[in-house]
Image (spheres, rainbow, N blue to C red):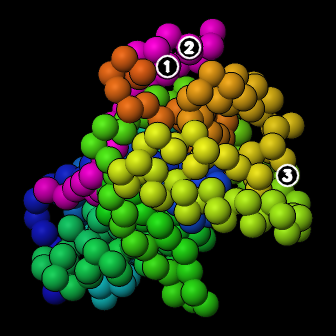
Amino acid sequence: MALVDSVVRVSVPATSANLGPGFDALGLALSMRDRLTACVLPAGLVVEVSGVGADTVPRDSSHLVVRCINRALEELGEDPVGLPQSERGLKLTCDNVIPHARGLGSSSAAIVAGLALGRGLVVGGDLLMSDDRLFELAAEIEGHPDNVAPAAYGGFVIAGHEGDAFYAVSSPVDPSISAVVFVPSTPVETKVARGLLPATVPHADAAANAGRAALLVAALAGQPSHLLNGTRDWLHQEYREPAMPESLALVRTLRADGYAAIVSGAGPTVLAFATSRTERQALVSRTPEGWVSYPLEVDHDGVVVS
């Protein structure tokens, strides 16, 4: 095998996981994309970042995308690039749009993008590493599949693991459904949000959540009138309120007015579903002061490589 001598380009969507009751299981790709390029150099490592994270992300081999490029190369039997001991270098450019530490899957996007870039840098890499294997590697790196699955495949995905094996099953989304995400200025790290969750929950809450998650799948597939009931959660959102009180207050306010609003992923972003342009515009008008709102479509493409 050999590495290509051209630039590989990748774009990958933002994602929203959980969607209310689907804790660590449901994920949706959204029409907000990071765009990255990579090429092999004779030696060294160049990391250029613009947009989100330009002032904070590392520029060395600890960069998550660089690590995932090399994980893909390892999987394909190639030596790493861009490391001090590497025989070949790497130039990586990242044009980031997905907010960091806001519950929109920025780390999952980086993982999927890095693996796709690494696969693309190998001649015939797309024949040697299937999309399903790329997803499995991404889930192993991330530790759970709910965000990496829609980032890889696009659309609405039900994901999980059975023993050491991960699975992802795509499910349809009614074409009338879109979303508005409300992004606050203050981040919340996923590990902080997870640290607030209890070790056990009442059986009645777990049963109620299972029913609502099933209802949400049906609502997204073609019965959007059930989105409000289908997004009710008992397992995680309220436990996380101490880390994001403004987010939970916004969720409650929007739901009281009939909007299917949830905490996106581990938060603090709030996502609300819309089924018409009028409804989406009305949601945007509800953006709290100091927050930024983005009206988004469901992304059906997942990671795209050229």
| Residue depicted at x 19% and y 58% | 305
Residue beneath label 3, please? Answer: 196
Q: Nearer the viewer, mark 3 or mark 2?
A: 2
Relative image position of residue 31 (x, y in whole percent): 33, 39
Q: Secondary structure at mark 1?
A: helix
Q: Position of residue 171 (x, y in %)?
A: 37, 63
Check whether the beta carbons of the residues at disc 1 and disc 2 lie within 8 A of each other.
Answer: yes
> Marks 3/1: CA distance?
29 Å
Residue position for label 2: 286
Q: Is residue 150 left or right of residue 283?
A: left
Which corner quadrant holds the C terminus?
bottom left
Judge the density around disc 1: few (<14), some (14-19), many (≥20) Cα neighbours within 10 Å.
many
Residue 172: in magenta span? no
Q: Is residue 106 left or right of residue 129?
A: right
Type of the residue with mark 1: Leu
Measured in 3D between alpha carbons, the distance from the residue under mark 1 to the one under mark 2, in whole angstroms, is: 5 Å
Occupied quadrant, residue 56: top right
Q: Nearer the viewer, residue 226 or 171?
A: 226
The range drawn in magenta is 281-306
Secondary element at image label 3: loop
Residue topped by disc 1: 283
Measured in 3D between alpha carbons, the distance from the residue under mark 3 to the one under mark 2, in whole angstroms, is 28 Å
| Residue 287 visible, this angle | yes
Report which quarter residue 22 is drawn in.
bottom right
Q: Nearer the viewer, mark 3 or mark 1?
A: 1
What amino acid is found at the position of numbered circle 3 in the picture?
A: Leu
In this view, the residue in front, 123 or 87, is 123
Question: Up-down: is 208 above or below 187?
Answer: below
